[in-house]
Every structure is written in structure tokens, then in C-alpha cells.
Image (spheres, helix red, strand yellow):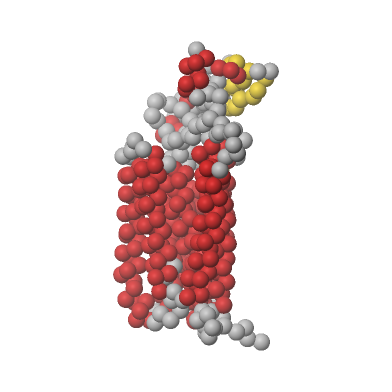
Amino acid sequence: MSAHTHDDVRNHLKVYIGVFLALLIGTGITVYAWTWHFESVTITIGVALFIACIKAFLVAGYFMHLMSERKTIYAILLTTAFFFAGLMYLIVWSREEMPRGTRWHTGPNTSSQIQNAQ
Amino acid sequence: MEMPYIVEPRPDTGLFNAKVGIWLFLASEVMLFGALFSSYILLRVGANSWPHGLLNVPIGTFNTAVLITSSITMVLAWANMKMGNPSRSRVYLGKTKEYHDKFVHYEVRLVDGTVADGHIKERTPDFAIKGFKSEAGSIVFEPENVLKGNPGESMSDVKARLPAKERYEEHGQRQEMKLDASQIRWICNYVPRHSTYFAIYFTLTALHALHVFGGMIVLSYFWFQNRTMGRKNPERYTNRLEVGGLFWHFVDLVWIFLFPVLYLL
């Protein structure tokens, strides 16, 4: 981005305004999608994060100029993405890898236990 | 002695030094917020119940729009410097600062150290309690002086409707309420001590607000510099704006994920 000239920037102004409007619309869609009340929690989370990812792409790609950056920046970000993915994998791993004979504690007040107690 | 590569790019990286520096810093920030997001996931999947609808979505949406607007004004401030227009750049930087102020106002205005004003829905008068304490297997609820309002009416509406002397009246049921602990399935208050949800909510939003505040200080400094460095050494100043802008857009990017995760899901 450092190499952008006066004219380049002038040509990009409309793009910046377009991205800004897209971000506002994306926010509106996120809130509107929230009112749909999907039956599956997975779908609800999926839709919200999908829209958030598009908005993040717009901010990072255009406002932060990642669409036309130097290799050094991409190298830094790839390293970060690797460690970030590792961090998130640890979460999944901690959920899946349970010691033998153990299970996740579901709490004393599940509805079935309350019914049993009654 | 002149510091090298503050204006012209280094031959090996093709970037000026501050830009490499800010990206390395942002990489560490990704890991910081990543750690907290992963904590959120662990807390949420491990919780028996997770509260919904406690936060005020319209105000959260408004805050998101404010932050996005501050991002575009930041970009325009940088673009105007690139186009050799420092005066307009200063105006846009001033607007960015203004939107920062608005965002911080709504994000971190805490009332009684417990409730973020405007963020968490106000308690309905019928259920308002000051607090609760544990006593030998029982939970004792202490009632609170509350405003009398109609169902569905917000606290600010009630405040606006009633004259000052009538604003604070004691609720009809002033006696303490004592319940056996075994009768209570789940209990929560708007403080981190009583709720895992609010613990992670305040941790994430407070850290984000701290970043907004930090960005505000830096951009205010740049705003003052516009009339000195912005005129005398515009290329160096433009680079500074770009670096400050990168930080500000990152803060915006974090909020893009925080908003649906904390307010909507």
C-alpha cells in the first residue's frame, strides 16, 4: 500500500465508501438474521459468524489494504493464522479427548433429573 | 541523527519500519483476543445455561454503526493526506475522534460498578432486587428502591414522565425474601462474581474499550500534529496516520465479532 500514488487513492475513494455502506448493510443483516430464530443453534452461530467473516474481510481487505500488501505482511499474518488455528484446535481437542471412564458434567439440575426427583 | 526508514521503505521488506512494527503488534493482539474468545467458547459449551436477551441490541447495533463510521472517517483522513489535503484530513480525523468518544461513552459507562448503562436492559420494577446473600442453606433477597413504571416502559421513560420528588418510591413489597437454596435452580446478578456470562462479557468489552481508549489518545495526538508535522513533513505524517489507522481498523474488526457473539448468540 505504501506505493499508492495520489491518483490511486483518488480512484479508491468510491471503493472505500462502497465498503462502508456494505458494512452498514452487513450489520443490519446480522441483526435481522438474529430475529429469524433458527431451530438449530449451529445454524444460528454459522449465519452470524458467516456475516461477521464477510465484514471482517471487507475491513481487512480494503480499509487495512490487505488486498494489495507486501509479502512480509502476509508472512506475519500466515504465522499468526497458524498459531490462532492451533489455539482453536486446542479447544476442540480439550472437548473431545476425555480420560477413560469420564464424561462431561451436565450439572445437577437437568430437566430429566428434576423430573426424576419429583 | 536521522532515523532510517521512517518515510522511505526498506529495500528488503518494501515497507517502512513502523508498518512492520504495527503488524507484529496486531499479530500479538490477534492471539490476545483469540485466547479470550477461546475462553468464551469453553465457558459457553461447559455452562448448564447461558443467558439470552439481557443486552440491549439496538444500542449494540448503534455502537457498531458508530465504529464503522469512525473507520471510514479514518480512511478518509489518511486518503486526504495522500492526496495532499492536510486540512480536510484534520477534519476527518476530528470526526473519527468524535465517533470514538460516542463509542466509549456507550461501551464503558458503568453505573454502580455493575450495570453498563444502556447496554444491559433495565430491570423491570416487579423483579428489582438489590442483591442476595447466602445464609445457612438459604438465599436471602434484599429488595431495592425502584421506580414505578408500567410494563414494557423503560427506566428512562419513567424518569422523564415522573416529577423529581416522585421518582424514587419504595416498592410495595419491601420485606426481605428468604428461599431455601434447594428451591433455586439458577441465580444470577449483573456482576461477574455471580455470572460466568457477565464475567466474560465485561472482560472482553473492557479490554476492547481499553483499546478504543488507547486509539483515541494516539489519534488525538495525531490531530494536534496535523498542523505541525502534517505541513512540514507530510509523508512521515501520512505514514503515522496509516499505522494509527491500521490499529483503529483492527479494533473495529474485533468488535465485528464481539457484537454477534455477545449480543445476538
Q: Nearer the viewer, residue A83 or A31?
A: A83
Q: Quadrant of the C terminus of chain B?
A: top left
Q: Quadrant of the N terminus of chain B?
A: bottom right
Q: Is residue B141 positioned above or below A24 on the image?
A: above
Q: In x, y percent, where is residue B114?
A: 58, 38
Direction from residue B119 to residue B202 in the image, left or right = right
Q: Is residue B239 positioned above or below B184 on the image?
A: below
Q: Is residue B216 visible?
A: no
Residue at the image point whose x is 47% and y is 22% from the top? A111
Q: In x, y percent, where is residue A6?
A: 38, 81
Q: Nearer the viewer, residue A66 or B216?
A: A66
Residue at the image point whose x is 43% and y is 64% from the top? A60
Q: Is residue B37 positioned above or below A14 on the image?
A: above
Residue at the image point whose x is 42% and y is 78% from the top? B82
Occupied quadrant, residue B190 = top right
Q: Is residue A54 visible?
A: yes
Q: In x, y percent, where is residue A62?
A: 39, 67
